[in-house]
Image (spheres, rainbow, N blue to C red):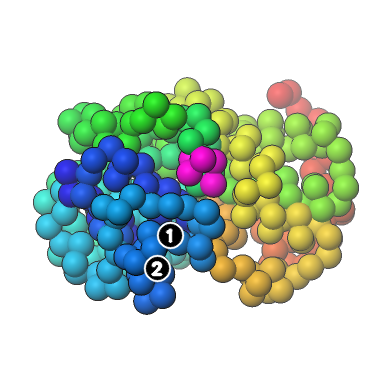
Amino acid sequence: MTVGILGSGAWGTAMAHIAAQNGHDVLMWAREDDVVREINTVHSNERFLAGALLPDSVRATARLLDLCGRDVIVNATPTQFIRTTLVDELATGAVVVNLAKGIERGTRLRVSEVVAHIAPSMKSFVALSGPSHAEEVLRNMPTTVVCAGRDRDAVSMVQKLFMTPTFRVYASDDVVGVEIGGALKNVIAIAAGIVDGLGMGDNTKAALITRGLAEISRLGVALGADPQTLYGLAGLGDLFVTCTSRHSRNRAVGERIGRGESLDQILGSMSAVAEGVPTTQAALELAAQVGVELPITERVAAILWQGADAEDSVRRLMMRPAREE
């Protein structure tokens, strides 16, 4: 098949590597001319995925519309930038596979809703998510993810496209659950990082992950998700790895906040995007729309933008009124 990768970050690069290993024709789009040259000449991407050695069949371009006419378009750009990169002409007749994990700021739309609005000529949409750090995928460490879509044939095709002996893809029809699990886990990971930065222990981290999953489930179910999805790879699995891994950008943002750095300092020093930051406010707005309470997300927002003290925020969560689990 012909595959276009929209974005040259770590995850887009890892997925290009998998698709090419499976014998597919892969063309990546990158904003940076030096990244395009590096991929085309030495078959690496040291800026975004150090150590990656891409198959010779992977090519790159800085011209977005070079990806037109591909069977599959894989969106590997962050949620907040999709509208400035994915155009209908690019997706016409293609299956769009989304890797981004977020909720659009301002509109409160999930990525599938954004794509449906800006690319109505696409053939179908599939969301791919799960506990999957690009660095480990590149090293062929066993990884499992889930792809979700309403078109069974498209989901089956995406499974075959990316399945390898070390990268297992499960199928689902619960797009809402997969998207909400992927988006909200980044917010909870920021909170987990704050806990790490404050020097709190395993008890605290376990409580945060567990109650964070409860928040994700409440919002997902209110939006029509199957609760079982949120206890699977796109929910609990991705939440666990993002809250605990040294590879997690969102957890790293939280850890630096817990150690006293400002959000502006942190974001200014990062070359990659931490999707949980803009998703925090979007999630709160979406939760208010459907009448769901997200206390951990509320405290993360207060710390990020209102100058709330991190340790005091933990105390506030601990002193909430007693209730059943």
In the rendering, at what x and y percent does residue 145 appear? 44, 33
Dot 2 falls on a residue whose secondary structure is helix
Q: Residue at x 71, y 24 (%)?
A: 325
Mark 1 nearby-residue class (10 Å; few <14, some 14–19, many ≥20): many
| Position of residue 184 in the picture relative to residue 44 (left or right) | right
Q: Main secondary structure of the magenta part?
A: helix
In the rendering, at what x and y percent does residue 226 appear? 42, 27
Q: Which residues are magenta?
A: 135-139
| Cα separation between marks 1 and 2 | 6 Å
The number of numbered badges drawn on the structure is 2
Amino acid found under the numbered disc labelled 1: Ser
Q: Which residue is mark 2?
A: 38
Amino acid found under the numbered disc labelled 2: Glu
Q: Residue at x 56, y 31 (%)?
A: 237
| Position of residue 221 in the picture relative to residue 150 (left or right) | right
Q: Which residue is mark 1?
A: 44
Location of the N terminus by quadrant is top left
Q: Nearer the viewer, residue 113 or 155?
A: 155
